[in-house]
Every structure is written in structure tokens, then in C-alpha cells.
Image (spheres, rainbow, N blue to C red):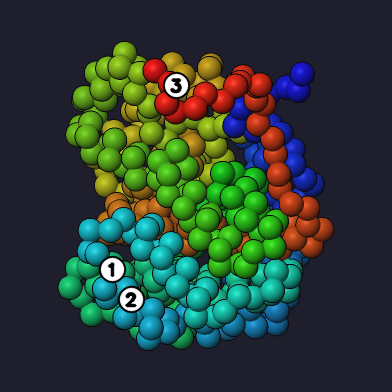
């Protein structure tokens, strides 16, 4: 009998040169470069180029790539009309999913080739920040702001969101956030993108599926849960009582635990530095005290702090509303989705796993008039 591996945990479905995760050592590499070095020295534009093309760009290549992103930031008028009509109470990830799907209809059905994936990837990577900022402003009865032609990818998003150029420390924090979110091997949303792509469907359908997977609270949606958790606790003095009640009630500590990392997530260490630098002191104190309890009582079981834990405090410091946090995850992860989709279809094989059947066979059909 075949072995059943629920959740496909530690099942390798292909080989890749894009990302390596050392879950026990707490290390992460994009194309061989450590996440710490990229977060300190690189930009989201450069990291996206690295993920897509397998090498760090020259000055000329990065300039051309960045200019291409800038040229693709603006939304077509048809999509602006659609965003205006979207329900104001709709979850931003649902709006983003609909917007990307709509763009796929405007641009037709592209062929499923590596070259086409990267071409469409430029367009969608450039437009997701504009979609998110436009949606936010419309639902708050504010006039949408045209994307800037001179600001970086990170700064432009904050500019379109708030209506003014961000402080340099905000720009850098957002840039680092997008780098940290850009890629993480074959997680749930990346597998979803690859599965759709393996059918030779179009790029937009694959990305829409990835957005749907990322929306879930066990994946990208956890970042929203973590910041709400700190707000629920309220003060550092209440952390210990809250923590042990959560354990007793078997409540999940949001931002703790990971399917691959059995130690502290290296991305969380980087986010923590920016949370301390920019964040609300009360929220930081709550999070730090709760972190200590998690590390003391749960780390021996392989449950430690993950990327979602500290990121919300950073976004809160930049006056970004909680409901947008998962869309920022998507804003970064589009780089990794696109890289994996392009890589996989270059040697495509339809992803078609099996389920181990545990039901009966050979049952006799009983006519409806004879059933009791």
C-alpha cells in the first residue's frame, strides 16, 4: 500500500535553483544569496530581477528593468471603473483577486511560455501596488493618486496610499518587507500557482489562484491575526495571563510555528529590527514579552517565531490599515510566484497527485423505490 503524506509535508515534486530553506538552521537563500545580505544591501527591484533571471543585474540591466516596472504602474480606465464599483466591505485580497482576473480578460489569453510569463509578470508586479492603494483610497472616499514616475517600487506604494512621499526610513522598511515576502520555495500559494500553470493555463489564472491561496489565515492572512493578537492583549502586564489562557484553550499563537522552520524564522529577525526602530512602543513591548514566552515554552516542540509575527507592527508604524497587510504579502510574493511559474513550465509536467482511497468498492445500486 502506498504511503499517505497528509499536506504533502516534505514531499519533493521537482528541483529548483530559486530558493533554499534550511528549516533547522533557520537560514534562507534566494539564488544562493542569504536573506540577511539581500535585506541589508539590495532593493525589491533588484531581488525580483535576481529571482526571475538567476543573477544579480548590472547597473544598466537594473535601470532598464526598473524603468519597465515604472512604465507599467498605471491602471487601465476599465479597471478603475471596476474598482469604483467593488463593495466597500469586500476583503482587499478578494478585490485584488478580482482585479488581476479582470486584467487577464483585458489582455487576452497569453500563451504559456517562460518568456510570456516574465513579460506579464512585469505588468502585474507593477500594477498590484496601484490596485491596492487605489482600492484603499476609493473605499475611504479619497481621490486615487496616479503612480509616480520617479519613486521606487516601495516608495511609490506608500505615496499612492497616503498622498505624500514617505520618509526615507519608511521607504526602506517597505522595501525590506517586499524583499522578505518575495520568495519562500513551494509554499501553499506557490504550489497553487505552479499547479494551475502546469495545465498550460494562462499567467493571470495562475496568479489569481495564488492570491486565493495566500488569502487564507493559515498562510498570508496570519499577518493580520498577529497584530490583532497584540491589540487584544492590550498591555505588557497582561501578556502572561493571555498566553497561558491561550494554551489552555488550545488557541493558536498567531505568528508562531512554521511547517518548514523548526527554529526562529530568519525573516522575523529582520522584521523585528524594523519593528523596534519604527513601531509603537507598547505593541513592541507586548510582542517582545509574548515572544519570550513562546520561545521558553514552545520552541522545544519546534514552534518558534515566524515572518508574520513582527511585520504587522512595522506596517502599523507606517499607518497602513490592518486589512491591507496580506495584500502587501502578495505585492512581494508576486516575484516568487512568477519565478517559479516560469521555471516550472520550462520543463513542464502536469501536477497530478493521488489520494489514497479508504472507502468501499463493489456496492450494489438499490433503486430509489426500494430504499428505506
Answer few, some or many: residues within 10 Å of disc 3's Cα (few below 14, many 20 plus, some between 14 and 19): few
Answer few, some or many: residues within 10 Å of disc 1's Cα (few below 14, many 20 plus, some between 14 and 19): some
Residue under numbered circle 1: 86
User: In the rendered view, would you say 313 is above or below 144?
Assistant: above
Left-right relation of 113 to 39: right
* Pick the front one: 94 or 170: 94
Counting residues from the start of the chain, the first of labels 3 and 1 encountered is 1
User: In the rendered view, would you say 221 is above or below 354?
Assistant: below
Residue under numbered circle 3: 370
Q: Quadrant of the N terminus?
A: top right
Left-right relation of 254 to 52: left
Under circle 2, the secondary element is: helix
How far apart are the alpha carbons under marks 3 and 1? 51 Å
Image coords of residue 236 (percent x, y): 24, 29
Q: Residue sitting at 52 percent across and 73 percent down?
A: 104
In the picture as drawn, the residue positioned furthest to the right comes out as 347
Q: Residue sitting at 78 percent across and 53 percent down?
A: 349
Dot 3 and dot 1 residues touching (CB under 8 Å): no
Under circle 1, the secondary element is: loop
How far apart are the alpha carbons under marks 2 and 1? 6 Å
Under circle 3, the secondary element is: helix
Counting residues from the start of the chain, the first of labels 3 and 2 encountered is 2
* Pick the front one: 350 or 190: 350
Number of numbered tags placed on the structure image:
3
Dot 2 and dot 1 residues touching (CB under 8 Å): yes
Image coords of residue 140 (percent x, y): 19, 68
> Does the rendering let one see residue 154?
yes
Amino acid at each position: 500500500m502506498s504511503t499517505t503524506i497528509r499536506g504533502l509535508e516534505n514531499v519533493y515534486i521537482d528541483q529548483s535553483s530559486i530558493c533554499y530553506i534550511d528549516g533547522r538552521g533557520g537560514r534562507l537563500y534566494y539564488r544562493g544569496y542569504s536573506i540577511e545580505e539581500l535585506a541589508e544591501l539590495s532593493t525589491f527591484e533588484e531581488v525580483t530581477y535576481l529571482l526571475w533571471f538567476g543573477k544579480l543585474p548590472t547597473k544598466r540591466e537594473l535601470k532598464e528593468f526598473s524603468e519597465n516596472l515604472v512604465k507599467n504602474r498605471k491602471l487601465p480606465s476599465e479597471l478603475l471603473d471596476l474598482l469604483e464599483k467593488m463593495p466597500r466591505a469586500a476583503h482587499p485580497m478578494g478585490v485584488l483577486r478580482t482585479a488581476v482576473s479582470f486584467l487577464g480578460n483585458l489582455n487576452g489569453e497569453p500563451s504559456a511560455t517562460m518568456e510570456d510569463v516574465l513579460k506579464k509578470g512585469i505588468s502585474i508586479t507593477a500594477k498590484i501596488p496601484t490596485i491596492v492603494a487605489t482600492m484603499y483610497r476609493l473605499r475611504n472616499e479619497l481621490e486615487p493618486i496616479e503612480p509616480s514616475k520617479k519613486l521606487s517600487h516601495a516608495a511609490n506604494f506608500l505615496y499612492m496610499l497616503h498622498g505624500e512621499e514617505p520618509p526615507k526610513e519608511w521607504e526602506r522598511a517597505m522595501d525590506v518587507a517586499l524583499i522578505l515576502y518575495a520568495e519562500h520555495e513551494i509554499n501553499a500559494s506557490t504550489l497553487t500557482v505552479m499547479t494551475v500553470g502546469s495545465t498550460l493555463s494562462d499567467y493571470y489564472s495562475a496568479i489569481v489562484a495564488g492570491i486565493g491561496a495566500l488569502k487564507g489565515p493559515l498562510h498570508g492572512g496570519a499577518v493580520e491575526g498577529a497584530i490583532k493578537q497584540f491589540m487584544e492583549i492590550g498591555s505588557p502586564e497582561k501578556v502572561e495571563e493571555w498566553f497561558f489562557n491561550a494554551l489552555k484553550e488550545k488557541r493558536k499563537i498567531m505568528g508562531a510555528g512554521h511547517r518548514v522552520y523548526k527554529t526562529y524564522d530568519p525573516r522575523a529577525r529582520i522584521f523585528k529590527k524594523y519593528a523596534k526602530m519604527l513601531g509603537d512602543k507598547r505593541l513592541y513591548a507586548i510582542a517582545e514579552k509574548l515572544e519570550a514566552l513562546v520561545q521558553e515554552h514552545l520552541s522545544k516542540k519546534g514552534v518558534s517565531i515566524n515572518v508574520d509575527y513582527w511585520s504587522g507592527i512595522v506596517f502599523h508604524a507606517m499607518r497602513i490599515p490592518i486589512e491591507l497587510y496580506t495584500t502587501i504579502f502578495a505585492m512581494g510574493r508576486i516575484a516568487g510566484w512568477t519565478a517559479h511559474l516560469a521555471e516550472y513550465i520550462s520543463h513542464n509536467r502536469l501536477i497530478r497527485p493521488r489520494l489514497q482511497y479508504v472507502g468501499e468498492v463493489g456496492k450494489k445500486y438499490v433503486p430509489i423505490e426500494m430504499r428505506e
